[in-house]
Image (cartoon, rainbow, N blue to C red):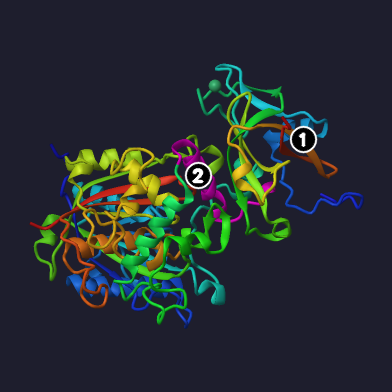
Amino acid sequence: MPGQLFKAAAIAGAAEANEIGFLENPVTALELHIQAIKNVCDQTGIPIAKIEGVFSTGWSTELCEHLGITPKYIDTTAVGGCSFEMHVHHALAAIHSGIIDVALISHGENGHSRRKIGGGGSGNYGAGAGALSPAAEMSMAYGLGGAPSNYSHAMVRHMHRYGTTSEDYAHIAKVTRDWATLNPRAAMYSKEKHPFGGPITVQGVQESRMISWPLTILHCCMVTDHGGAVLVVSPKVAAGLNNKPVWIAGAGESMSHGNMLEMGDFTATSARHSAQTAYTMAGMGPSDMEMAMIYDSFTITVAITAEMLGLTPPGEGHTLWKDGHAAPGGKFPVNTNGGGLSFNHSGMYGMPLLVEAYRQLSQTAEDGVHGDKGKQTDARTCVVNGTGGSLSTTGTLVLMADD
Amino acid sequence: MGGDPKLSYNKPIPNQGNHTKPFWEGAKNGQLMLPRCVDCNRVHWYPRHICPNCHSTNLEWIEGSGEGSIHTYAVQHMAFGPWAEEVPFVTAYIDLKEGDRMLTVLRGVDATKPEDIQVGAAVKVEFEQANDDTFIPYWRVVEE
Ligand SMILES: [Zn+2]
């Protein structure tokens, strides 16, 4: 039986900034935010002035000031790429409690443009105790730099424990790229769009440049520009929209550690717990899910997460891709936008998960702009899972199509 | 932290915290000092202000054996700053004999043959002097 918050709120709409990807003309994170907010309000018919709650990774004050609004609910949760799934969870609770009826969740990050113009990319993500933390003190000597250098350790432990190989995970990169070739907005849509775009092979993934063994560059996400926004609304507001809502059936969040030094089990994440909370709220389980949007910062991230979400037994996450189920036309589509691996990943990827889940469940994933023929699935339920930090933090949502 | 001209250590050197001083003092003498909870008797790493297992603040330092095993590892082909000159190099998380885990750059292994490195292999700690106050622990695979 579903819990109290089952369908207590809906995603009213989801939109992106006008241009995303490897933008030639540099953009600021703020521009990306504002374009997406304008677009989602136009899409839904909900005026910006009606926004009552603002949820973002540290940006809420600046956004509200820029928009000239004075919200009554402010949330700046910034715990990595899964923050946006948590924002949906928090908005659901705020709406259920009657504090607000319309919540804005906004993302803007110029991961690519920042290299040219700097600044303001990730909204205070991960500042914490910083250099004064004892975890940093006991880690900083050892030459790790950036996410790939950490995540590779999880892949090696998974290989050791379950006998998987890096080639098993290469199937994930290949299949996810197949999805990207159906999405004109994906950075790796085609050779015309990007010199390294278009279809890839498992062998090509394995032979690409080594970054942190066993992760080659094609096992890793890109760093691009992205802005996205969703509106989460009460059932009352959802009844009067321009477009179809998508219902929030379940939500959960959790964490296991911050620094990878404290990751007890390198083959598991807290998605096991956040998913359980979300499934319980929804009164559903993994076998009720018809597709998934799973944070794929690296191939190993999505493989482990598939196991945590109960979509496969432990150690077999990669088989969803290797056996073709997750692929276009497969029985269990995953990451239908092309993923952080081949669609877009600005640093924090939680927002694109929400946007694509909305499009799939509202049957707008194949509109010629955000999808070519073959991208739209017939899924009516979708499990969405964001992962932040170093496999540290997770937010899980169970979403359902409108009746 | 003045650099000793006799020392060639050019990698990042940690800033020492107040509550981690016993660790760095021990390192100068080649001792691997570890924090242990007096109440639940468990060793934890990194050093805490409170026991992460039972939440006691009754903590002490013990001299560890300096022995452990490889929990997992990776080979870094891309790095930043002075470490960029060392690629490829092997990083590893080490299970301490006393419990809990440390990060290290692994010594005594061939970074060009990652498949030859064994999860579970025995390792021993050694210290490299970085400056007057800092000796940094590194772990080395024990020859069989
Ligand atoms: Zn204790």
Which quadrant is the C terminus of chain B positioned in? Answer: top right
* Residue B79 falls in image quadrant: bottom right
* Three-letter amino acid code at the position of disc 2: Ala
Q: Is residue A158 magenta?
A: yes
Residue drawn at point x = 40 percent, y = 80 percent: A193
Q: Evaluate whether residue A303 shows in this view.
A: yes
Q: Evaluate whether residue A122 shows in this view.
A: no
Within 10 Å of disc 2 (Cα), the crowding (few <14, some 14-19, many 20+) is many
Q: Is residue A121 magenta?
A: no
* Three-letter amino acid code at the position of disc 1: Glu
Q: Position of residue A129 (x, y in %)?
A: 57, 47
The CB of the residue at mark 1 lies under 8 Å from ligand 1: no
Seen from the viewer's position, the closer of residues B8 and A95 is B8
Q: Residue furthest front?
A: A203
Which segment is the magenta one?
Answer: A140-163
Q: Is residue A58 above or below residue B40?
A: below
Instruction: Please tell me how many numbered marks the rendered image carries.
Output: 2
Q: Position of residue A130 (x, y in %)?
A: 59, 50
Q: Which mark is residue B126?
A: 1
**Tag 2 and tag 1 share a subunit:** no
Residue drawn at point x = 64 percent, y = 46 percent: B91
Q: Position of residue A157 (x, y in %)?
A: 51, 40
> Residue A354 vs residue B96: left or right?
left
Q: Position of residue A92 (x, y in %)?
A: 24, 50
Q: Which mark is residue A154?
A: 2
Seen from the viewer's position, the closer of residues A309 and A256 is A309
Mark 1 belongs to chain: B
